[in-house]
Image (cartoon, rainbow, N blue to C red):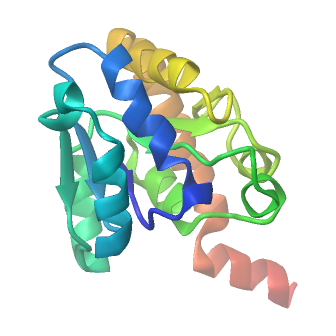
Amino acid sequence: MYTGQLFEWKGVDSLIKSIKLLPQETLVYIIGGADRDVAKLKKEINEASDERIVFVPFQLHGKMPYWLNSADVLVLPNTGKQKVSLYYTSPMKMFEYMASGKPIVASATPSIMEILNDNNSVLVEPDSPETLAKGIISILNNENLAENISKNAKANSKKYTWHSRAEKISD
């Protein structure tokens, strides 16, 4: 599952391209994005994978825990081709993913790796549908890995709550 905007630098095209490399029974949910961005992505999908990708329109923030908890794997496929993605983003969804207690597969960009690491996620080469698929499959096939990184991400997420950030600022 991917949640959020569908801007080019978010790397969702890598997730779409990875579907042909995932087990046949795998469904990919993409939640959010403007209608024009969804339409653009749908044009890129070939017919063989079309039925395996489910687009869900924008959801209110209060409903996101339901969606996140229904996923087997949460994906953060940021591109390595644009500076905003490489160095200047700290996606809110990353912290939501961590707090959900679900396993995360994310692009190994400097901005993402300020928070995520091999102990709390599976990091993959940006812009590589092949390594993204391998990362997802590694979680689907390894219950211990999924459990360990999920537990660590959830524990790490406590350092990034608004309350924790406010305490650091006031200190």
Residue 126, horizontal then vertical, whole percent: 67, 35
Q: Residue at x 17, y 33 (%)?
A: 52
Residue most extreme to the right: 171
> Residue 92 occupies which quadrant of the picture?
bottom right
Residue 66, horizontal then vertical, whole percent: 20, 59
In the displayed structure image, the side of residue 156 where residue 110 appears, left or right: right
Q: Residue at x 45, y 52 (%)?
A: 97
Q: Is residue 40 above or below residue 70?
A: below
Q: Quadrant of the N terminus?
A: top left
In the displayed structure image, the side of residue 70 where residue 41 appears, left or right: right
In depth, the one of 86 and 102 nearer the eye is 86
Q: Residue at x 33, y 26 (%)?
A: 19
Q: Quadrant of the C terminus?
A: bottom right
Number of dots carrying numbers: 0
In depth, the one of 50 and 27 nearer the eye is 50
Residue 102, horizontal then vertical, whole percent: 38, 40
> Residue 53 occupies which quadrant of the picture?
top left
Q: Is residue 163 visible?
A: yes
Q: Residue at x 52, y 30 (%)?
A: 149
In depth, the one of 7 and 154 nearer the eye is 7
In the displayed structure image, the side of residue 136 where residue 45 appears, left or right: left
Q: Is residue 27 visible?
A: no
Residue most extreme to the bottom: 170
In the displayed structure image, the side of residue 32 where residue 123 appears, left or right: right
Residue 145, horizontal then vertical, whole percent: 47, 17
Q: Is residue 170 above or below residue 20?
A: below
